Amino acid sequence: EGVSLAGAGSVDGVYVATERNNAASGVSRPSVLRYDVTGAGTTLPATNEWNLASILPAGIGKISKVAGFAASLAAKGVPMPTLMAYLTIAVEIGGGLLLILGVIPRIVAVVLAGFVVIATATSHVFWTIADPGAAAGQQIHFFKNAAIMGGLLFYFVAGPGRFALGRKEWN
């Protein structure tokens, strides 16, 4: 787990990389939390959360829709769309599992961040869409992916939590 201050200090927020799910002890849930520490009170709730485990369900969802996903890649001009569809599923499922388990987490975080950059540049180019409603939907996905990339890079910097399988020591 790691902590980072944004901007000029804690006034701009405190970011925490964590793998723990306080609601279910022993369950790994890699995420980045933002806290506003300027408020009064005795509790400190997170104001934002970026769940880094969201990549895994995306890959699982594509398993039963490989042909349709490959067709959508072909329509976007992606070369070898069927192969790319299977590679995408492998990266999302394999990378998601490795990240959740904490196995080679820093390498996985960088690989997944690169994957999300490519996926975003391929599928969420909202500025090229003429229909305002469709463009707005793709803009939401674009910025969601930007947040995921930021979370993955923060996870790379902060490293795994103490329950990660990839740690050399358990403390």
Image (cartoon, grey):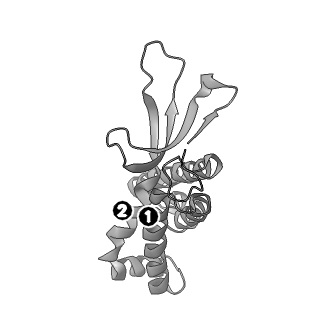
Residue 131 visible (yes or no): no
Q: Position of residue 153 (x, y in %)?
A: 61, 52
Image location (x, y in percent) of residue 156: 62, 53
Decide: marks 2, 1 in contact (CB < 8 A)?
no
Looking at the rendered image, the quarter that the N terminus falls into is top right
Corner quadrant of residue 6? top right
Residue 125 is tagged as none
Q: Which residue does the numbered mark 2 point to in the structure image?
A: 57
Q: Is residue 107 left or right of residue 56?
A: right
Q: Can see residue 155?
A: yes
In the rendered image, residue 25, in percent from the top left (x then y), is placed at: 35, 43
Secondary structure at numbered mark 2: helix
Point out the residue furthest to the right here.
8
Q: Would you say 25 lies left or right of 130 here?
A: left
Q: Residue at x 44, y 85 (%)?
A: 82
How far across and down, in percent of the image, does residue 10 sit?
62, 24
Residue type, numbered disc 1: Leu
Which residue of the protein is positioned furthest toward the left in this rendering?
64
Amino acid type at circle 2 is Pro
Left or right: residue 57 versus residue 121 is left
Position of 43 relative to 166 (above/below) = above
SS at mark 1 in the image:
helix
Q: CA distance from mark 2 to mark 1?
A: 10 Å
